Amino acid sequence: MLLTLLKQYWWIVLVVLALLVLQSTKGSRNKGTSSEKSEDLPYVLKRYLMTRAERSFFGVLEQVTDSSKYYIFPQVSLSNLVTVEKGTGSYQAYHNKVDRKSVDFALFEKSTISPVLAIELDDSSHDREDRQERDAFVDGVLAKVGLPLLHVRAQTTYDPKQLAASIGEAIRR
């Protein structure tokens, strides 16, 4: 008798099984999405946007930059400074190359919010081979788009006059 019922109502059994499968996969697909409770998310607030060396340099940079002409933004993503040219094949691949890279500081003209200078504070990590390759790539990208890049060696103190002169010279290039 059970066999007879299964033969007549096989499609109901199939639908029930399909619904069970969908329900079980729905839970695993939603992991990591907005349905997670905020207290379950693995994030903590970063206390500082910049390293101690970057904060020290930022203070001097503020002193020597004409605040009536320029904004100083720290930790600017390269993808906010450049974009892949329209019509270029492999857009996503080229975008991904710049997407997770940033420069330590960028000066933006106040009237247009256009970038005029990128600044990299080079500490000892920039002596590593992998970092030099990354720096060469960033240098090349910014040179290609015509945005000057100033490399400043990290120090305990900075000569404000020298820094101001270097910035002025880099912007005029």
Image: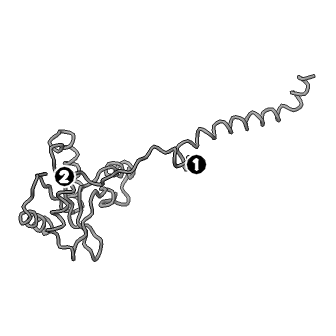
Q: Position of residue 98 (x, y in %)?
A: 31, 51
Dot 2 lies on which element? helix
Image quarter (top left, top right, bottom left or bottom right) of the C terminus: bottom left
Front-most of residues 6 and 70: 70
Coloring scheme of the render? one colour
Q: Which mark is residue 127?
A: none
Horizontally, residue 80 falls left or right of residue 127, namely: right
Please name the amino acid that badge 2 sits on: Ala
Q: How many marks?
A: 2
Horizontally, residue 104 falls left or right of residue 85, namely: left
Horizontally, residue 163 falls left or right of residue 24, namely: left
* Disc 1 target residue: 35
Against 111, residue 164 (above or below) is above
Front-most of residues 132 and 66: 66
Q: For mark 1, does the 10 Å Cα neighbourhood hold few (<14), some (14 to 19), or many (20 or more) residues?
A: few
Q: Position of residue 137 (x, y in %)?
A: 22, 49
Image quarter (top left, top right, bottom left or bottom right) of the N terminus: top right
Horizontally, residue 6 falls left or right of residue 42, namely: right
* Disc 2 target residue: 53
